[in-house]
Image (cartoon, helix red, strand yellow):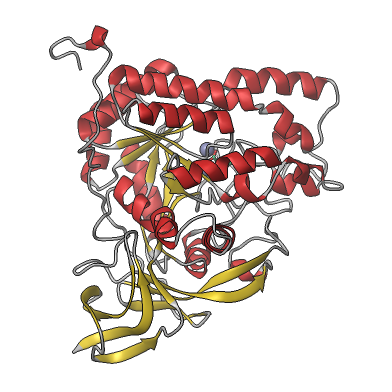
């Protein structure tokens, strides 16, 4: 007898769709079949039963380098993620200069403990790669189950130099973990920003002008070249340009271990949103910035053909008030407005509606992009991201036919706006199950904040990739 049976739905994985029941025992998938018996049942007739979403890029209970705190903590952020069809999320644990790695991870453990309704891990941001960090603390982080490091090529208080980047790439490779990068050229951004500010061009729209496409393209190219030089795997996060995506595709075609991500804001919003009246445009300031409509079409193409391995929200919630976007005043210049926008609850409904329901991607591709690829890339497959015997019973039950007009209330986060307001979407997650326990049931929160657990992750599997360090580095015991 199962503890719970999700019955009568269409089970969808990254490889197939079929009608069946999911039988769950002790939080794990025990049986896939028909007419299963259970102590409890959830009726999924006419619904899709998918692996729960894995949100692989979000900022929760995180201070920015300049000290601003995100409005969502693990309580509100996890609830919003669950309402959006997610059963697991991987926010960042951000090291700041002068701080160690263990103390950073301890801090985030204290922020997440007994708070999250879904399981979680952290990507570790490295902003201060001291010799002690590189030699001792990173291996301790890997032993704690943190198998992805992130670096910034921009932001004065976070960015690493090219030589530090190389050191992190090679150290991560040695440990079998993945480096992620925010790729924008800091010098270009600073140079243009200073000129704009001096000239009095301070409105939100100048944020996009100060972060030109070429700043991303140059940094992506440099990041790929550095990774190629040492033959290390690299994930380029939040790619916003067609040229940047083309560089990733070219690198993949060369057999390099280059992965990439894009986000809903680059597919569904554009730079005209920064021109909204008054300071409304501040709601749409994020980095890299919103681009144009033509870029949206190009990014969709790259999503379809597999250039992007993951599709993440980059949920960076700063309220439209003096605690967030307007902390530096109600008419602050663009460079003093917190970067980022919320969207953790909208990532999957938007992708489902505009992707699956509009015929741009298959259901299998949707499952890959929403869950399975993140699980594989970040060391959680097959425990998560899969509907298979022995996997965690992490499921999202979708009604593919519901039509909704997006509201702020639908977000269930700690925010006072959504950039996706009033968009019409078709398809919505109605129930979400984490390790066999309902978190959202027919649209109502029933989950418990002590349920979500830290999920230690495995090293990454690069079987099947080619690649060698640059010939000049082919020196025995170089590293
Ligand atoms: O604007 C953004 N994306 N803010 C969050 C921090 C980052 O760069 O990912
Ligand atoms: Zn970033
Ligand atoms: Zn981010």
Task: Judge whether 97 appears above or below 468 on screen.
Answer: below
Q: Quadrant of the C terminus?
A: top left
For image coordinates 19% across by 70% down, the residue present is 389
Which x, y percent locates residue 88? 38, 61
Check the image and name the residue furthest to the front.
359
Q: How many marks?
A: 0
Which x, y percent locates residue 92? 43, 46
Given residues 446 and 407, the one toward you in this image is 407
Given residues 58 and 30, the one toward you in this image is 30
For image coordinates 62% across by 70% down, the residue present is 410
For image coordinates 56% across by 28% down, the residue present is 243
Check the image and name the residue furthest to the left.
476
Give left or right: position of 23 versus 247: left
Which x, y percent locates residue 353? 58, 63
The answer to whether residue 450 shows anywhere in this view is no
Q: In which quarter of the image is the N terminus?
A: bottom left
Given residues 304 and 58, the one toward you in this image is 304
Task: Judge whether 306 appears above or below 90 on screen.
Answer: above
The answer to whether residue 154 shows anywhere in this view is yes
Quadrant of residue 201 within the rendered picture: top right
Quadrant of residue 351 within the rendered picture: bottom right
Task: Judge whether 44 appears above or below 416 on screen.
Answer: below
Which x, y percent locates residue 291? 67, 37
Given residues 248 and 476, the one toward you in this image is 248
């Amino acid at each position: 007898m199962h503890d719970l049976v999700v019955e009568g739905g269409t089970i969808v994985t990254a490889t197939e769709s079929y009608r069946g029941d999911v039988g769950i025992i002790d939080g794990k998938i025990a049986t896939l079949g028909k007419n299963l018996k259970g102590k409890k049942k959830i009726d999924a007739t006419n619904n899709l039963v998918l692996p729960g979403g894995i949100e692989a890029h979000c900022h929760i209970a995180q201070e920015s380098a300049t000290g601003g705190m995100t409005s969502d903590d693990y309580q509100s952020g996890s609830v919003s993620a669950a309402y959006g069809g997610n059963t697991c999320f991987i926010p960042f644990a951000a090291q700041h200069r002068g701080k160690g790695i263990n103390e950073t991870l301890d801090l985030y453990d204290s922020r997440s403990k007994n708070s999250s309704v879904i399981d979680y891990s952290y990507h570790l941001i490295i902003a201060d790669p001291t010799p002690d960090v590189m030699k001792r603390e990173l291996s301790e982080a890997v032993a704690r189950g943190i198998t992805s490091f992130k670096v910034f090529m921009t932001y004065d208080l976070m960015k690493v130099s090219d030589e530090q980047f190389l050191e992190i790439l090679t150290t991560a490779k040695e440990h079998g973990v993945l480096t992620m990068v925010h790729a924008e050229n800091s010098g270009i951004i600073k140079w243009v920003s200073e000129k704009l500010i001096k000239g009095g061009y301070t409105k939100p729209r100048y944020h996009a002008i100060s972060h030109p496409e070429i700043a991303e393209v140059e940094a992506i190219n440099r990041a790929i070249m550095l990774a190629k030089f040492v033959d290390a795997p690299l994930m380029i996060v939040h790619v916003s340009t067609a040229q940047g995506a083309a560089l990733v595709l070219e690198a993949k075609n060369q057999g390099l271990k280059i992965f990439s991500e894009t986000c809903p804001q680059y597919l569904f919003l554009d730079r005209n949103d920064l021109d909204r009246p008054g300071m409304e445009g501040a709601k749409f300031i994020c980095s890299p910035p919103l681009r144009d409509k033509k870029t949206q079409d190009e990014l969709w193409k790259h999503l379809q053909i597999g250039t992007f391995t993951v599709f993440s929200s980059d949920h960076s919630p700063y309220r439209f008030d003096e605690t967030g976007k307007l902390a530096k005043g109600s008419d602050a210049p663009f460079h003093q407005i917190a970067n980022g926008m919320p969207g953790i609850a909208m990532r999957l409904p938007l992708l489902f509606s505009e992707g699956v329901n509009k015929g741009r991607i298959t259901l299998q591709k949707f499952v890959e992009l929403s869950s399975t690829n993140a699980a594989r890339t970040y060391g959680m497959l097959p425990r998560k991201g899969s509907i298979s015997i022995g996997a965690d019973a992490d499921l999202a039950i979708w009604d593919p036919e519901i039509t909704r007009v997006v509201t702020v209330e639908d977000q269930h986060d700690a925010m006072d706006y959504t950039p996706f307001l009033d968009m019409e979407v078709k398809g919505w997650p109605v129930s979400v199950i984490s390790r066999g326990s309902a978190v959202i049931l027919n649209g109502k929160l029933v989950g418990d904040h002590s349920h979500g657990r830290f999920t230690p992750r495995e090293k990454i599997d690069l079987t099947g990739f080619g690649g060698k360090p640059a010939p000049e580095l082919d020196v025995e015991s170089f590293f």
